[in-house]
Amino acid sequence: MMEQPSIPENVTGGFIARSSGTWVQTSEGWFASTWAIAEGGPIQDLFVYDHEGMDSRQVPLATVISAEDVASEALYNGHWIPLVSMWNDDSIRIRAPIASSETGYCAVLYVYSSPEWEALVSLPHAELHDQRGGNGGVSFRVPLTEIEDYRETVTPIFGASMASERTIPLSKNLSAVDELARLAPSAISVARTDTAVVVQAGELTFRVTLMGRAWRVRKSGRSDDRGVAFEATDETDIARFLIAMFANDIRRARGLAPRQRAVTLSDDGLAEPAASFMLSGSPDAGFVLTDTYRQIRWRFASDLDAARFSWIAPLAWTDIRAEFGWSEEAP
């Protein structure tokens, strides 16, 4: 599941959405290309739209980091519907990643046909199109704040997005992850390269890499690759996940007694997370942990890992340090 397209999660609440199409990452950020790009390149001329309006400009190829095709979907009234474009309240076209918490924006959702057709056409904002002209289907112009969730399928075209790992920019602050080594230097090692942070304790290894806009944590044990265990867009959530995985190793290294939390199962057979958290999913599709209070979501490969993370997720850094008898300033 987690080896499928990267799905950005906004840890400040909600998500970051962008419309379907070809997106180009430059040194200035992400921009929508004016036309599709052949997989693998090469390209001679590249034009991208401004973030607002219909103007476009040529981009120097030396500034291009990667390009990818994006198929976006929005969850609206319980239905996943393709997200084809975004606009502001002044009816100006927006081609930029937008946080769902931002007001003054709307998304246009469109589907030509669907097994859920009868349910879709009865939803609020539904607009039926005349099929006689070949442009049938149903569309929805929905305020971004009314969209319940977002996902995207990313197909790398060329550049860094095609690599298994990309260079971690110096601007990315991973001091929270580095702190793991300071919490328990005798038990946990943290090594950094240009493309990864490798955290190891005993026979368990986690490799943190940057994929597009999302951090991925890949898990292995005894040289057995267990795949991507966790994804997030916030560096401190990566550190929280690793602390949740190594909590008792850290406690033992600091002379503290291990904490034993009995794992209980829900009626669905999933590990029960902490109060105010909800867990859904399956081993095949992966698991989504939701903080129902802050409306934040994270994705996991294991329900047990998600449950462990739920105990750490709401804690401030000062509280996390207090758990291990550490009192320096938070990163």
Image (spheres, rainbow, N blue to C red):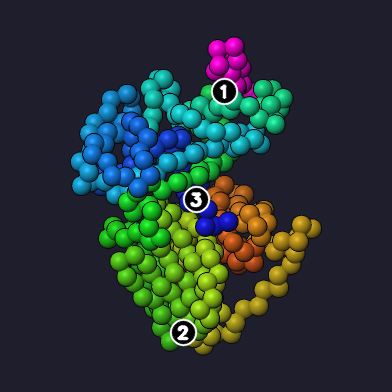
Residue 240 position within the rendered picture, expressed as x and y whole percent measured from the top left: 49, 65
Amino acid residing under circle 2: Ala
Q: Residue at x 60, y 49 (%)?
A: 293
- Element on which disc 2 rests: loop
Between circles 1 and 3, the one closer to the viewer is: 3
Quarter of the image with the N terminus in it: bottom right
User: In front of the other: label 1 or label 2?
Assistant: 1
- Where disc 1 sits, the SS reads strand
Residue 194 lies, in percent from the top left, at 30, 66
Circle nearer the N terminus (1, 3): 3
**Residue type at tag 3:** Pro
Residue ID for mark 3: 5
From the viewer's side, name the closer residue of 176 and 161.
161
Residue 329 picture location, percent across and down: 37, 69
Q: What is the crowding at mark 2: few (fewer than 14 residues within 10 Å), some, or many (at least 20)? A: some
Quick one: label 3, few (<14), some, or many (20+) residues within 10 Å?
some
Alpha carbon distance from label 2 to label 3 = 34 Å
User: Furthest-right residue in view?
Assistant: 267
Residue at label 1?
139
Q: Report the amino acid beneath label 1.
A: Ser
Image-based side of 56 in relation to 7, left or right: left
Please, what is the dominant secondary structure of the magenta stretch? loop
| Residue 125: in magenta span | yes
Q: Residue at x 35, y 47 (%)?
A: 40
Identify the residue position indicated by label 2 in the image.
187
* As drawn, 156 above or below 272: above
Which residues are drawn in magenta?
123-137
Q: Is residue 280 left or right of residue 133?
A: right
